[in-house]
Amino acid sequence: MANIPTPKDAEVFAQSMKKWQQILNLYDWRVEKGSKPAKQAMASVEFNQSARLATYRLGDFGAEKITPESLDMTALHESLHIFLHDLMAVAQDPKSSQDEIEMQEHRVINLLEKLLKDSNGCT
C-alpha cells in the first residue's frame, strides 16, 4: 500500500526545503516543487544547471512513517544533493581544472566549517 504525503505534508516539506536552502546558503538556486511524483523514492531532485533550477518531487515513503521529522530529514537529504551538485558536476567533468575542483571543494568545506563551529558553540 502506498504511503504518499498529504497536501499538508507537502507544505511541511516545502517549508523544510526553504529552511535548508537558507541554512546551506543555496540562494543561487531556484528550488521549486515538481508536478510529478518521485519514482521509487521518498523524494528526488532534478537539475537544470543553466537555469540554476532544482526541482524536487515527493514520492512514496514506503515503510517510513511520515512525520514532521521524517519530512524535514528528507528535505535536508534533497537539499544536500543541491548543495553538492556543483562539486559533483565539476569533479565529473574531464575538462575541469584542478583549481575549479578545489574551488568547489572549498565552497563545501567553508560552509561545513561554519555550520559545525556554530552547532558546537565554538568561538
Image (cartoon, rainbow, N blue to C red):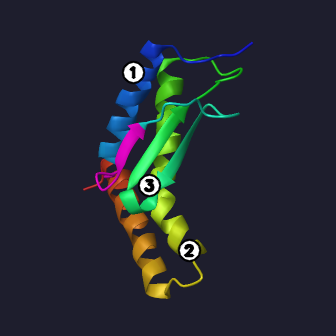
The residue identified by callout 2 is: 91
* Residue 51 drawn at (x, y percent): 37, 57
Q: Is residue 36 left or right of residue 72?
A: right
Earlier in the chain: of badge 3 and badge 1, it is 1
Residue at point 60%, 82% (across, down): 94
Q: Which residue is mark 1?
A: 11
Q: Quadrant of the C terminus?
A: bottom left
Which range of residues does the magenta coloring cover? 24-32
Q: Distance of mark 2 from mark 3, alpha carbons?
A: 14 Å
Q: Quadrant of residue 113?
A: bottom left
Q: Which residue is mark 3?
A: 83
- Helix, strand or loop for disc 1: helix
Q: Nearer the viewer, residue 90 or 25?
A: 90
The residue sitting at 40% across, 51% down in the picture is 53
Location of the N terminus (image quadrant): top right
Looking at the rendered structure, which numbered label has been put on residue 118?
none
Q: Which numbered disc, 3 or 1, marks the residue closer to the eye?
A: 1
50 left or right of 97 in image: left
Towards the viewer: 119 or 61 = 61
